[in-house]
Every structure is written in C-alpha cells, then in structure tokens.
Image: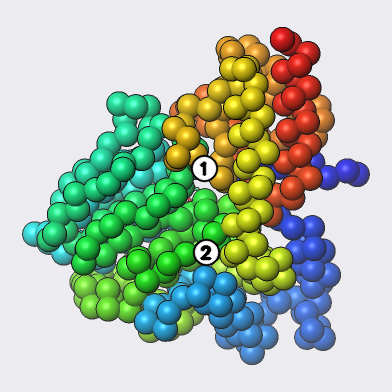
C-alpha cells in the first residue's frame, strides 16, 4: 500500500523512521516481556524515556537552566485556562494580540479568568496581517502571542519587544521549526500533534521565577508548581505520546536540529509560495507577504467550485487534507517538520498542472 501524503493541520504526518521504531517496540520493550506502554510510569525503563525527551528538548531548543520543561495533558487548549489561573493575579491585567482563531480562543478563556487588554486586533483585515510593533503596558502581567496561526496561515517572523513584561507564546504549530531565543520568552507552550509527535502531550517551557505567582488556592493539577516539583510525574503522564515524541526529537537531532528544520521549512514553503506568486492570480494567498507562515500555507482559487475540484483531484493523487479550515474556507497545505520535501514537490507539480489545464 502506498503512503498518502498528509497535509492536514494536525495530527500531522510522522517520519517513517519513527513509525518503524514505534512498531518495532510496541510488542516488547528492551527484553521486559512487556511493551513500554504496559509498564509502570515509575519504572526505570519509562524514566529513561521521560528524561531523554526532556533533555533532547533542552538540547535542541537550547533551553537555559532557569527554565522548566513540563509535559502536560489537556492539549494546548488547557493552557488557555492554566496560564491566566497561574500567572494573572487578581487586580492586574495582561496584554493580548488577536492575530487569528487560536489567539482569539486563548483570549476568550483568559477573559473569563481576569482582565485583558487587546494591543492588536487583526479582525478588520480578516486576520491577514501581524502588528509592526506593540505598545505593551509596562504593568501588564504578561503579553500573550500566538507564534503561528494555524488556520489563518500567519507566522511571526520577528519577535515583539515587551521590555520587562514576560512574553508567553503559543507555539503549537511551529515549535522546533526554527531556532528560538528562548530567553526572550517567559513561557512557551505547544500541543505535540503538529511538529512533535502524536496527540496527547503538551509541552510547557516555563521560566522558573514565574512559578512564584502560582496561587496556592489552585487544585493540584491546575497548578504548574505541582508539575515542576514532580518533574511532570505528579500523575500518570501520556506515556505513549512522550515515547513517540522522544523518537521524533531524536529524528530532528539526526536531521541537524532546529537549524536544519529552519532551512528545510524555508525551502519547502518557498516551493509552494512561488507557485502561488507565479500563477498570474490563478492561486492567491490572502496573507501579507512578510507574515506568511512556513507551516500552514493558505491559498484560494478563483471560486469555491474550482477549490472543490482542486481538493478532489489532489485526493485522487493521494494528497489529503488540503481543504482550508471551515472558518476561512479555501485551501491550506500544512507542511510541518516531518513533511518530506518530496511530498511538497508532489503538491507543487500538481498545482502547476492543475493551473495549466485551466488557463
Ligand atoms: C492546534 C492548536 C491549538 C490547540 O491544540 P490542542 O492540543 O488541540 O488543544 C492551539 N493553538 C494553536 C496555535 C494550534 O495550532
């Protein structure tokens, strides 16, 4: 059976080498007479996996010592609640940039917990632009940004300046796709299922001093300090997701790390954007050029009928998931770290041919 090419926004494709490794170890793990996912999360075998995943993260993203790396449940979505519960004290307010669907979801949850000031709202432009600069409130508890808007196809290419105000970033859909100045952020979080592995685990990288804010009134799971104190083993972690993620991280390291992912993602995105830009308007990208995402490429054809045909024809050629999110319509190609360049080239060839046959 030939493998389909997965352009879905998530869960994403995984490297075939990683899938092979998982398959090999699912029946039996290291002579235990059990698979890893049947054993205790307190076993020495699992402990080694857990700690290797954490240390690979530290190595690949160059995470300084004064940051915790936490593995949590509940998806990036639970972070929308936990962040304000832990880091937005009563009587203070935080700053937000509304750059698309995900930032807006985080904002809606934050507003239920405390006060929020909106520094930028891309709504009027249909969420096709990012701010040039921000006037961050000096007394803001933190500034929240969404580094890559998965649905709108926008990505911050230059990090905002916030002075002494901690920056918290949702990097669910572009973490580890480029080197990061981690010290610019107080917290970075990401669900695993786009760039890091299968769904089930959420990564939170948190500067240690921020934990002083976590209120004792919070229940155990919702308090970041609980997880930091127990090395993310307070309760049963999603062991399979973390195990798979460890293999993805090993794979990224083998490819050459964040720098290699950066280079590859630039090359892959350029292949598709070039087709769009050189199509004489057959394909259009609604996002301003300087904010285009290298992970999620959003584009339109002349009309919805043509888009339907495009998506159906692509499906016949084993290319899946090219339909845009229902909120914005159109087409979208999600090309995360694990998408091979050959998959992108196949899409590019099809786009060229599809346009040629109709102009
Ligand atoms: C997918 C996504 C989320 C939601 O992640 P879950 O793990 O499904 O909760 C949040 N933010 C961004 C930017 C995303 O792409």
Number of the label disc, if any, that sits on residue 351: none
Q: Is residue 200 visible?
A: no
The quarter holding residue 143 reads: bottom left
Residue located beneath label 1 in the image: 293
Q: Residues within 10 Å of mark 1 (few under 14, many from 20)?
A: many
Which of these two is toward me, 85 or 177?
Answer: 177
Mark 2, residue position: 179
* x and y, in percent, of residue 326 in the image: 51, 28
Residue 161 pos. (x, y %): 28, 57
Q: Is 197 left, or right, of 171 in this rendering?
A: right
- Location of residue 55 with respect to 180 vertically, above or below: below
Residue drawn where x is 51% and y is 42% of the image: 293
Relative height, residue 148 to residue 218 (above, below): above
Residue 344 position, x and y percent, is 72, 41
> Which residue is at a point 38% across and 35% down the rendered structure image?
129
Residue 296 versus residue 284 in the image, above or below: below
- SS state under label 1: loop
For the C terminus, the image quarter is top right
Outermost residue on the bottom side: it is: 44
């Amino acid at each position: 059976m030939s493998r389909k090419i997965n352009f879905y926004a998530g869960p994403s494709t995984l490297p075939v080498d990683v899938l092979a490794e998982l398959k090999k170890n699912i029946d039996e793990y290291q002579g235990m007479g059990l698979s890893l996912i049947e054993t205790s999360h307190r076993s020495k075998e699992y402990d080694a996996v857990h700690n290797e995943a954490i240390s690979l993260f530290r190595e690949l993203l160059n995470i300084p010592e004064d940051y915790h790396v936490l593995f949590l449940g509940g998806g990036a979505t639970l972070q929308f609640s936990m962040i304000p519960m832990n880091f937005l004290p009563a009587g203070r307010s935080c700053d937000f940039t509304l750059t698309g669907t995900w930032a807006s979801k985080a904002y809606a949850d934050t507003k239920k917990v405390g006060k929020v000031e909106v520094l930028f709202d891309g709504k009027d432009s249909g969420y096709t632009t990012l701010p040039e600069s921000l006037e961050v409130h000096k007394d803001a508890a933190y500034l929240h940004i969404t580094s890559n808007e998965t649905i709108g196809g926008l990505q911050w290419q230059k990090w905002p300046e916030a002075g002494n105000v901690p920056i918290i970033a949702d990097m669910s859909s572009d973490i580890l796709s480029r080197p990061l100045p981690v010290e610019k952020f107080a917290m970075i979080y990401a669900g695993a299922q786009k760039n890091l592995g299968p769904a089930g685990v959420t990564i939170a990288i948190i500067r240690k001093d921020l934990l002083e804010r976590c209120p004792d009134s919070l229940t155990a799971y919702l308090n970041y300090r609980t997880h930091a104190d127990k090395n993310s083993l307070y309760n049963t972690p999603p062991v399979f997701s973390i195990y798979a993620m460890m293999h993805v991280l090993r794979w990224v390291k083998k490819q050459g790390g964040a720098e290699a992912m950066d280079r590859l993602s630039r090359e892959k995105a350029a292949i598709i954007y070039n087709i769009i830009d050189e199509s004489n308007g057959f394909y259009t990208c609604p996002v301003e050029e300087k904010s285009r995402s290298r992970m999620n490429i959003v584009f339109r054809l002349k009309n919805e009928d043509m888009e339907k045909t495009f998506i159906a024809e692509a499906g016949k050629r084993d290319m899946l998931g090219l339909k845009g999110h229902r909120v914005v319509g159109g087409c979208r190609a999600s090309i995360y770290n694990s998408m091979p360049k050959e998959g992108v080239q196949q899409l590019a060839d099809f786009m060229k041919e599809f346009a040629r046959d109709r102009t």
